[in-house]
C-alpha cells in the first residue's frame, strides 16, 4: 500500500512537471516582441548604439537578462517596466524569436582594433585580466549553455557602457562578480578598444 502511494505520488509529480514544461515558440515571440521594437528594432537590430542588438543572441542569455530585470537583479527603469508583466513563457518566446534573427554589421573605430584584439585574445598581463575569448569564444559567439553572451556584431558603444557599469557597480548581475572583476582592472581606453574589436567580429 505504501509502495503504491509512493509510486502514484512520483507519477503525479512527473505529470505536473511535464505540464509545466514550455517549448519556446519563436513565432509567438515575434508577436509578443512588438513593444520591444521601439528600441531594439523589429528584428532585434537596434539602430541606436546605446541599445543592444538582440538579433542572434543566445536565448539562454536573453532569458536570464529579462528575468534579472524583472526581479531587480539588473536595474534599468525602462526595461524593468517592459518585462514586469511578462510570464516565463512570454520571456522564453521572445528570447527564441530574437535568437533566430540575423545580426547586422556593426560600426567601430578601426584605430582601436589592434589593442582590442590583444586584450580579447591575450588579456592584460599587467593587471591580470584574462583573455575575453575564454568565456566569449575566439569568434565572439559566446557560450549558450553557460548563458555567456555573444558579442560579435554588438554595438561597440553599448559594450563600453556595460563594461563601465560593471566597473562602477551599477550593473551587478554577473555570476561570481566575473565581469566586475575584469572591468575593475581595465582603463577606459582598454574598454573602448576591446569593444571595437568584438563589434567587428563576424
Image (tube, rainbow, N blue to C red):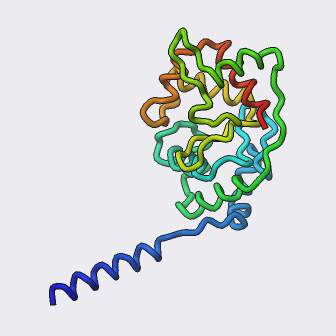
**Residue 182 falls left or right of residue 187:** left
**Residue at the (72%, 30%) spot, across then down:** 198
**Residue 107 falls left or right of residue 194:** right
The number of numbered discs placed on residues in the rendered structure image is 0
Where is 83 relative to 24, above or below? above
Who is closer to the viewer here, 150 or 51?
150
Who is closer to the viewer here, 135 or 149?
135
Where is 141 relative to 63, above or below? above
**Residue 37 falls left or right of residue 2:** right
Who is closer to the viewer here, 109 or 136?
136
Where is 44 relative to 1, above or below? above
Residue 110 on image: x %, y %: 83, 19
Q: Dividing the picture into quarters, in which one does residue 142 lie?
A: top right
Q: Classify the position of the C terminus by image quarter.
A: top right
Q: Classify the position of the N terminus by image quarter.
A: bottom left
**Residue at the (34%, 76%) spot, across then down:** 13
- Name the outermost residue toward the top: 126
Q: Dividing the picture into quarters, in which one does residue 46 lie?
A: top right
Residue 145 on image: x %, y %: 55, 50
Residue 114 on image: x %, y %: 76, 16
- Name the outermost residue toward the left: 2
**Residue at the (64%, 55%) spot, across then down:** 95
Amino acid at each position: 500500500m505504501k509502495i503504491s502511494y509512493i509510486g502514484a505520488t512520483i507519477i503525479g509529480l512527473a505529470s505536473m512537471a511535464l505540464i509545466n514544461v514550455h517549448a519556446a515558440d519563436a513565432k509567438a515571440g515575434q508577436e509578443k516582441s512588438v513593444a520591444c521594437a521601439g528600441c531594439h528594432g523589429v528584428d532585434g537590430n537596434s539602430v541606436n548604439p546605446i541599445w543592444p542588438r538582440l538579433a542572434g543572441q543566445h536565448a539562454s542569455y536573453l532569458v536570464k537578462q529579462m528575468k534579472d530585470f524583472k526581479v531587480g537583479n539588473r536595474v534599468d527603469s525602462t526595461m524593468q517596466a517592459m518585462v514586469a508583466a511578462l510570464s516565463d513563457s512570454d520571456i522564453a518566446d521572445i528570447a527564441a524569436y530574437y535568437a533566430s534573427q540575423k545580426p547586422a554589421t556593426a560600426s567601430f573605430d578601426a584605430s582601436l582594433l589592434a589593442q582590442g584584439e590583444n586584450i580579447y585574445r591575450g588579456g592584460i598581463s599587467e593587471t591580470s585580466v584574462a583573455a575575453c575569448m575564454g568565456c566569449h569564444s575566439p569568434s565572439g559567439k559566446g557560450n549558450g549553455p553557460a548563458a555567456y553572451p555573444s558579442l560579435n556584431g554588438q554595438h561597440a558603444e553599448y559594450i563600453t557602457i556595460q563594461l563601465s557599469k560593471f566597473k562602477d557597480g551599477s550593473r551587478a548581475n554577473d555570476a561570481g562578480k566575473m565581469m566586475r572583476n575584469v572591468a575593475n582592472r581595465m582603463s577606459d581606453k582598454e574598454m573602448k578598444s576591446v569593444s571595437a574589436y568584438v563589434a567587428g567580429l563576424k
